[in-house]
Image (cartoon, rainbow, N blue to C red):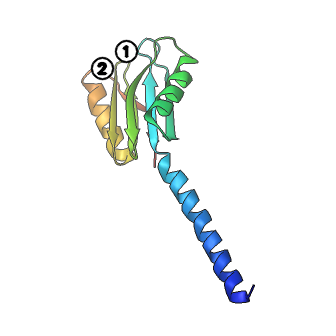
């Protein structure tokens, strides 16, 4: 094999590895947040290949602390935030970036409770 052929083969192999790693990173883009209004506990996930996987992980994470957890938001290739108030009233938001998702979550929480604070912001991208 000539040097030119070896370089071409090596370049093709490197390109294939890069393309494969880029594809697998791009394929894992779902996330979710689960919340317990009784206790204020929450769980979250990000960078999962399917909505179902993301929701199961968030639910399982929350249920380690409370039995009444439910998924309140899922997101794809974006961010989500959870804001919680003094009486465990809550709001969530999702948007392309973390700042916007926090702002939406706080506004939604303030419609339900007082003293709202962002507890978690998570992005999947």
* Mark 1: secondary structure: loop
- Whether 75 is drawn above or below 72: the answer is below
Q: Residue at x 27, y 29 (%)?
A: 108
Question: Residue 32: which numbered mark, if any?
Answer: none
Residue positioned most to the front: 1
Task: Count the numbered circles shown.
Answer: 2
- Whether 20 is drawn above or below 81: the answer is below
Question: Residue 87: which numbered mark, if any?
Answer: 1
Q: How far across and how far down the image is residue 106, in percent?
A: 32, 32
Indicate left or right for 64 with 102 as reference.
right
Q: Residue at x 47, y 14 (%)?
A: 39
Q: Earlier in the sequence, mark 1 or mark 2?
A: 1
* CB under 8 Å between discs 1 and 2: yes
Q: Nearer the viewer, residue 62 or 118?
A: 62
The residue singled out by tag 2 in the image is 113
Indicate left or right for 31 with 57 as reference.
left
Q: Quadrant of residue 18?
A: bottom right
């Amino acid at each position: 094999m000539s040097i030119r052929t070896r370089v071409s083969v090596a370049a093709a192999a490197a390109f294939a590895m890069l393309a494969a790693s880029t594809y697998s990173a791009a394929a894992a883009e779902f996330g979710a947040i689960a919340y317990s209004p009784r206790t204020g506990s929450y769980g979250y996930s990000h960078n999962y290949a399917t909505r179902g996987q993301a929701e199961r992980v968030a639910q399982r994470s929350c249920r380690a602390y409370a039995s009444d957890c439910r998924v309140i938001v899922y997101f794809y290739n974006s961010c989500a935030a959870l804001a919680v108030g003094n009486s465990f009233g809550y709001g969530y938001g999702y948007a392309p970036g973390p700042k916007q998702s926090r702002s939406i979550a706080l506004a939604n929480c303030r419609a339900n409770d007082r003293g709202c604070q962002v507890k978690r912001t998570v992005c999947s991208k």
